Image (cartoon, rainbow, N blue to C red):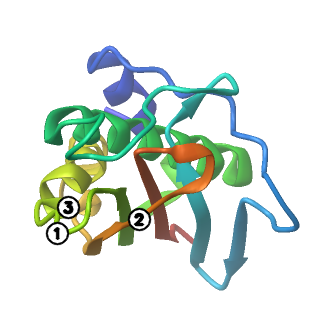
Amino acid sequence: MNPEAKLAALGLALPAAPAVAGNYVPTVRTGSLLFCAGTICARDGAMTHTGQVGREQTVQTGYDAARVCALNALANIRAATGSLDRVARIVMVNGFVNAVPGFADSPAVINGASDLFVEVFGEAGKHARAAVGVSGLPKNSTAEVQIVVELKA
């Protein structure tokens, strides 16, 4: 089953690739690697989750926010390559969690993105990762995800 069929089987659809919010591009390819700019949890221009985990958001809603971020990253990949079938593997995920000071469960939140990548790509979705808490994100987003993927030749 191809990645987009797997998304459909999960009851998910890729959104339109999100617009950039500054002087940068959503993806940069060098060799077989595609570096994807950070994506926040917005859908159709509206935020799905705002605020800090530990205050306005819970670990579970943060997980859901990270999942939205991952879908946006996949939308950028499809826009850059024409198809998610071009992905050989997810190489690296950097996850940022808008969290209260001292919040120690950032990995549980970013699992929302990591779990989706594994559900969609299987073994090729397993990746290296960082998951860090921060004091704020663009548009007060609850999460942000930045990824690197290897593309098939």
Q: Amino acid under label 3?
A: Ser
Q: Is residue 1 above or below residue 133?
A: above
Q: Which residue is mark 3?
A: 106
**Residue 35 left/right relative to 109:** right
First in sequence: mark 2 vs mark 1:
1
Question: Residue, x 32% and y 14% (percent of image)?
Answer: 11
Q: Which mark is residue 135?
A: 2
Give 50 or 41, whichever is nearer the viewer.
50
- Label 3 crowding class (10 Å Cα cut-off): few <14, some 14-19, many 20+? many
Question: Residue, x 60% and y 71% (percent of image)?
Answer: 34
Question: Residue, x 58% and y 79% (percent of image)?
Answer: 32
**Residue 83 left/right relative to 58:** right
Q: Amino acid under label 2?
A: Ser
Question: Residue, x 35% and y 45% (percent of image)?
Answer: 66
Q: Amino acid under label 1?
A: Gly
3D distance between C-alphas at marks 3 and 2 = 12 Å
> Where in the figure is residue 10, as x and y percent of width and height?
27, 21
- Label 1 crowding class (10 Å Cα cut-off): few <14, some 14-19, many 20+? few
> Where in the figure is residue 136, as x and y percent of width and height?
48, 59
Q: Is residue 30 above or below residue 123?
A: below
> Where in the figure is residue 103, as x and y percent of width and height?
16, 63
3D distance between C-alphas at marks 3 and 1 = 10 Å
Give 34 or 73, whichever is nearer the viewer.
73
